[in-house]
Image (tube, rainbow, N blue to C red):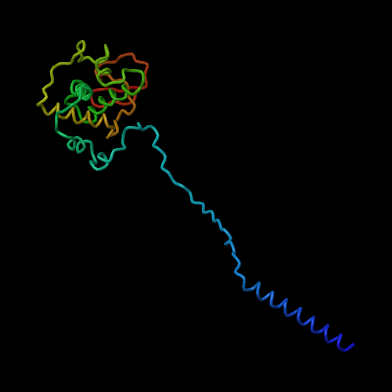
Amino acid sequence: MASAVALAGTLITGLFTVRAAGAAAEAMIPTLVSPTASTEFISRPIIQALPQAGTEAEEGDNLAAAHAGSLDALVDAQPTGQNLSDEMRCLAGAIYFEARGESLEGQLAVGRVVVNRSKSGRFPSSYCGVVYQPSQFSFVRGRSMPAVRTSSSDWHEAVAVARIADQGMWRSEATGALYFHAARVSPSWRLTRLARVDNHIFYR
């Protein structure tokens, strides 16, 4: 009986020893632990300036204008070369004959009417098409305009203003205008009057 009890004790001791060894062995086995993914959401408001109401998309968004500070300075900053395309010559010609001798703002307003018409879908799509459209500009005779004194300061100024109008470098005082007439006449137009600039009244 004593031997049986001793045998049982030996077996139990061995069993615990094996289990302990197994636990120790398991503790020594490297285990891959996946890191817990952590997602953090950060909410920040995105602030975007809204476009100013009533501005033309092609105007007032040119760095040259921002640096110039005034229309006079912007005109002075324009290239003096006379290598003009036919389209730019038509635009400068309209400014020259319609607003020669007026302020730069008045010349620009006339130039912008030609530009606006070409983009409106209601008039020819080119500057020359707009200028030479029948019965639109009084200085046009058939499909031609009078000779221009290209060496004059008035022509150089008209060319500079034409470049500014074409590229939308400066906001016109008659933004969006499609029509104008001399202030000395009073046509019965059913149009929205926008502004008077020098010797012309502008409408859309």
Q: Position of residue 89 (x, y in %)?
A: 19, 23
Q: Residue at x 83, y 84 (%)?
A: 7
Where residue 51 appears, as percent x and y from the top left, is 40, 37
- Left or right for 70, reference 51: left
Q: Position of residue 141 (x, y in %)?
A: 19, 11
Given the current orientation, which residue lies at the most extreme top position? Answer: 142
Seen from the viewer's position, the closer of residues 31 and 7 is 7
On the rendered image, what quadrant is the N terminus found in? bottom right
Q: Residue furthest right?
A: 1
- The quadrant the C terminus occupies is top left
Q: Where 191 falls versus 78 (above or below)?
A: above
Instruction: Look at 11% across and 22% down and name the residue there.
Output: 149
Which image quadrant is residue 100 in?
Answer: top left
At a point 26% along the width and 21% down the height, the residue shown is 127
Q: Is residue 129 shown left or right of residue 6?
A: left
Residue 10 figure quarter: bottom right
> Which is nearer the eye, 62 or 106?
62
**Image quadrant assignment for residue 166:** top left
